[in-house]
Image (spheres, rainbow, N blue to C red):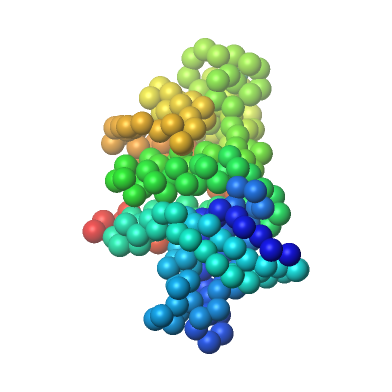
């Protein structure tokens, strides 16, 4: 069967003599794995379509399993994302996280648009860590783990200091905090930002500024959520952590 889909390359690996197998995220057909013959040859028309982060239109046929590319057109190459070490590391995390948390035939137009907006924001030079945290929140939502920040998940209280309990699925008020000894007490500015992240659609992202002192706790909070609900070791995250320790 022949398919014509829009897609973003979220994985690309060498295959056989000069070929590549790419995984694209599509808005309509979930994830698709496609073999691109001769992609690594200098004269290949399809080489640029196989690069990580490329947004394009892909024509392929597939009976079962792997598809085979017949034609494609680039919509946005996102080449900026492959040029700087740090930018590449951010974008690589976004696509690896997407790849590891989505299933083959589970299509989500919403997730596709969020990933596209995430890559565009990174390419425009918006703050990488903040963009990735926002995207992590969207991944949590799509995976069914969208946390509740507006009220205590245990008693519904909306007043006073809140602590994040990832395993309870949101925040606990001071009266209920004893229910999770690992809950992370949140400062007001972090709680506000988490609420904003929860509501925000990445496609409508304007300029977002996060103070340095807020960033530290925001990172702790998002890490707690991702580690509790996703908990998949990602190569790209290990690399990002190294960059954090030894900034360029
Ligand atoms: Zn409570």
Is residue 36 toward the left or the right of residue 134 in the image? right
Q: Extreme bottom residue here?
A: 17
Residue 234 pos. (x, y %): 51, 60
Depth order, front residue of 225/178: 225
Is the residue 55 above or below the residue 157 in the image? below
Is the residue 7 above or below the residue 161 in the image? below
Residue 5 pos. (x, y %): 60, 55
Residue 224 pos. (x, y %): 52, 42
Quadrant of the image containing the C terminus: bottom left
At horizontal 70% and vertical 68% (from top left) the residue drawn is: 62
Is residue 83 toward the left or the right of residue 107 in the image? left
Q: Is residue 15 visible?
A: yes
Q: Is residue 101 visible?
A: no
Is the residue 209 above or below the residue 7 in the image? above
At horizontal 49% and vertical 26% (from top left) the residue drawn is: 195
At horizontal 47% and vertical 52% (from top left) the residue drawn is: 94
Depth order, front residue of 129/63: 63
Q: Extreme left residue here?
A: 248
Q: Extreme right residue here?
A: 64
Is residue 23 toward the left or the right of residue 208 in the image? right
Residue 21 pos. (x, y %): 57, 72
Total numbered labels placed on residues in the image? 0
Quadrant of the image containing the N terminus: bottom right
Depth order, front residue of 105/182: 105
Is the residue 9 above or below the residue 43 in the image? above
Depth order, front residue of 90/222: 90
At horizontal 66% and vertical 60% (from top left) the residue drawn is: 3
């Amino acid at each position: 069967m022949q398919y014509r889909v829009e897609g973003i390359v979220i994985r690309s690996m060498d295959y056989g003599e000069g070929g590549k197998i790419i995984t694209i995220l599509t808005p309509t057909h979930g994830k698709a794995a496609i073999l691109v013959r001769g992609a690594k040859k200098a004269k290949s028309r399809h080489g640029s379509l196989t690069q990580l982060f490329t947004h394009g239109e892909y024509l392929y046929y597939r009976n079962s399993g792997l598809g085979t590319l017949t034609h494609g057109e680039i919509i946005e190459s996102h080449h900026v994302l492959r040029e700087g070490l740090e930018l590449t590391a951010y974008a690589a995390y976004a696509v690896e996280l997407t790849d590891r948390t989505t299933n083959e035939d589970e299509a989500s137009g919403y997730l596709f648009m969020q990933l596209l907006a995430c890559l565009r924001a990174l390419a425009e030079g918006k703050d990488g860590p903040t963009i990735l945290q926002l995207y992590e929140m969207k991944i949590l939502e799509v995976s069914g783990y969208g946390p509740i920040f507006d009220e205590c998940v245990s008693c519904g209280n909306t007043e006073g200091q809140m602590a994040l309990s990832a395993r309870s699925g949101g925040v606990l008020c001071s009266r209920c905090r004893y229910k999770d000894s690992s809950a992370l007490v949140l400062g007001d500015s972090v709680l506000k930002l988490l609420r904003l992240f929860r509501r925000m659609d990445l496609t409508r992202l304007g300029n977002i500024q996060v103070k340095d002192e807020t960033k530290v706790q925001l990172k702790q909070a998002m890490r707690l959520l991702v580690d509790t609900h996703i908990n998949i070791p990602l190569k790209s995250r290990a690399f990002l952590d190294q960059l954090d320790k030894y900034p360029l």
